[in-house]
Amino acid sequence: MKSFGQNVAVAGVDLEVRAGSFYGIVGPNGAGKTTTLSMITGLLRPDSGSIQVHGIDVWARPNDAKRIIGVLPDRLRLFDRLTGAQLLYYSGILRGLDNETVRTRSADLAAAFGLEDALNRLVADYSAGMTKKIALACAMIHSPRVLVLDEPFESVDPVSAVNVTEILQRYVASGGTVLLSSHGMDLIQRVCDHVAIIMHGKVLAAGTIDEVRGENSLEERFVELAGGRKVAEGMEWLHSFSD
Amino acid sequence: MVAQFLRLKLRLLANLFRRSPWQVVGIVIGLLYGLAVAALFVAVLVGLRFVEDVELVRNGMVVAGSAVVIGFFLFPLVVGIDDSMDPRKFALLGIPNNRLSLGLALSALIGVPAIALALILAGTVVTWSRGPGETLIAFVAAVLLLATCTLASRVGTSLAGLLLSTRRAREFSGMLGLLLLVFMAPVAVLLFNVDWASNGPDILTRFAGFLAWTPLGAAWASPGDAAMGEWGSSLLKLLIAAASVYLLWLAWLGLVARMLVTPGREAAVRQYAGLGWFDRMPSNAIGVISARSITYWSRDSRYWVSLVMIPIVPVLVTLPLAIAGVPSHYLALVPVPLMCVFLGWTMHNDVAYDSTAIWLHVASGTRGTADRIGRLVPALFSGIVLIGLGSGVSIYLYGDWNALPSMLGVSTSILLAGLGFSSYTSARFPYPAPKPGDSPFAQPQASDTASALIQSLSFVGSIILSLPAIGFALLGIFVDPVWHLPALYAGVGMGVLAVSSGIWLGSRVFDRRGPEMIASALRA
């Protein structure tokens, strides 16, 4: 539960994410997705409630919890005056890895995300998609048990998105847990095995993809839960062009 | 169309007040200050109406006025103000270029600088109201000047927007502005040393005589010439002024047309081989955090500005003292401790400089001690060099090597105490700083006045904690040299105590308040 002044951003989100699942959170803008994920990763103090990750209470034993979580926040800056290589190294060492391990893992991650050519450039000069990819690489470098990714595919090009999805799927297959948020229903339906629909800070539906969507596609179910589509009437002027 | 632009600008100004109460207070104070300064100038100008020495008034006005015109042009270029009426924002509306340019130029008249200028120009009309002809010319000149300054500032802002659209160019322009300020210092000293009583009017006449025939000063000189009875040169200067307004207008038209079809400039991207400082530092949390700090000190213009200021401040302080006649061998003792004050203080808002990137430290569970110590490393290293070399040079100039322990003690105490305060305040009371990539001068309004106040106290705090060392040092210099050694012990002891307790307190705060630091960075 979290509120900002009068605004209740998250009003009691009760989610159970099983270890080894690929869990998607969807919801319209301002639904409380980022707020929820920030509280799970220890970046935003909840007003009440508790968060357990592999049996560790995130807000009671933050340092133990943070060790097993990898984070990709949305809309927070990176230390972007570092080069890509420096940023990876920085994240790795801060996560407690040793010199050798960080260097080999950095090289692996750069190859996997197609960032080899960009490693020696400042992150400030990266495009939005590349920034997202280097941040993803930083989130994974300490091989956490749980990856919490806020909008990981936003502005990432389709080829890289497929690449990233594959990496994440292999990670889940080997026992890791991925919790991600997205606007892209198609993508969630394709890659996730579980999904929760959040709106106005509440969970409207949660479960396996098939349980949640029933007969329909996820997108149709989502629109239905969101209170139906507003039929766009009275826009006839748009069809008679002004010149 | 023009009316809409004016309304838009009014609306933008009105929206300035729809912020937090403290920001509104800041804006109101800024407005009142601007109006008060304008009112002061108007009063002076009205007073000048009754001065008989017309030539002196004219010359003074030409020189001061030319500076105003240059200021309107250069200020946006150097400071890089955020342009709410950037022509590019209207690019998609398909407005004909002439009307867009006119609307934007006229809307620039609504704003504190333009209104203050208009008031002052009205004052100049009063100054020259010594006859119907003079008044008329003064009025025309005032209108031309208002147009000149408005267009000059629009052209300056747009040039800044067009040329400085890349990250690196913006940073360099900020530095350029600072260096410009630095080079102003010798000029100021030169001006101080002129014997104004005897040579003043002469120099002024020479300057004004030149400026009056340039676009900068022509309009300022024209009514004065008329008052002196030189109608021919008065009209000629009015013509020059009108022509320069026209040329500026053409430049503005051209710039708008150019900007509408020019997206941001692409910068050549630089490659950095290897890990730089990260290779040279130990691979643990303290090592990488200090490597990151050192890297930022060398790559981020916001740090450059504070670093460049450190050697400038002693110059600015000692010069007036020297002119006032303080013996130079005492002055030699001032710079190093003073630079230590500022070096210790540079770190006082370090967390805010990271902006929201600090999440990485929070999410990775970085220990507060590692963060605190790592950030201090660059300041400590440069401090050791500064104190080591600086003290030697200072004492050499002072001439008595017995004072060396005092110098070392006082400087060490000030630096370490400052770093101690900074370690605590940067974690506990971060206040809004320029964001990464912004102009180092774009200091955002501190919405939380209390924390800004506490930050300033930390500046004084380092000096207060160093009072024992300073006291012993003064005794050593003025009473008995045996006091020099106690100054060293007191200084080093107090410094070590202050920096270690600062780091200890700061670490605890850092460990506890991680989410709150992110929240404050998000608010900034």
Image: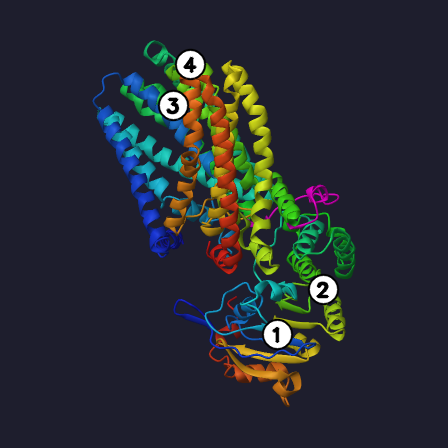
Q: Quick check: can you spot residue B263? A: no
For the residues bearing labels 2 and 3, Cβ distance under 8 angstroms: no
Residue B30 spot, x, y in % from top left: 34, 43
Could you give the CA–CA distance between mark 4 and mark 2, rounded to whole angstroms? 65 Å
| Residue A196 position (above or below residue B191) | below
For the residues bearing labels 4 and 2, Cβ distance under 8 angstroms: no
The residue beneath circle 4 is B327
Q: Residues within 10 Å of mark 3 (few under 14, many from 20)?
A: many
The residue beneath circle 3 is B63
Q: Residues within 10 Å of mark 4 (few under 14, many from 20)?
A: few
Residue type (three-letter) at the residue carrying disc 1: Gly
Residue type (three-letter) at the residue carrying disc 4: Pro
Between discs 3 and 4, the one toward the N terminus: 3
| Residue A203 position (above or below residue B346) | below
- Single out the mark in the foreground, 3 or 4: 4
The residue beneath circle 1 is A55
Residue B213 spot, x, y in % from top left: 42, 21
For the residues bearing labels 2 and 1, Cβ distance under 8 angstroms: no
> Element type at marker 2?
loop
Residue B361 spot, x, y in % from top left: 59, 55
**Quadrant in the picture for residue B56:** top left
The residues colored magenta run B260-285
| Residue A139 position (above or below residue A194) | above
Magenta residue check for B346: no
Residue type (three-letter) at the residue carrying disc 3: Val
The residue beneath circle 2 is A143
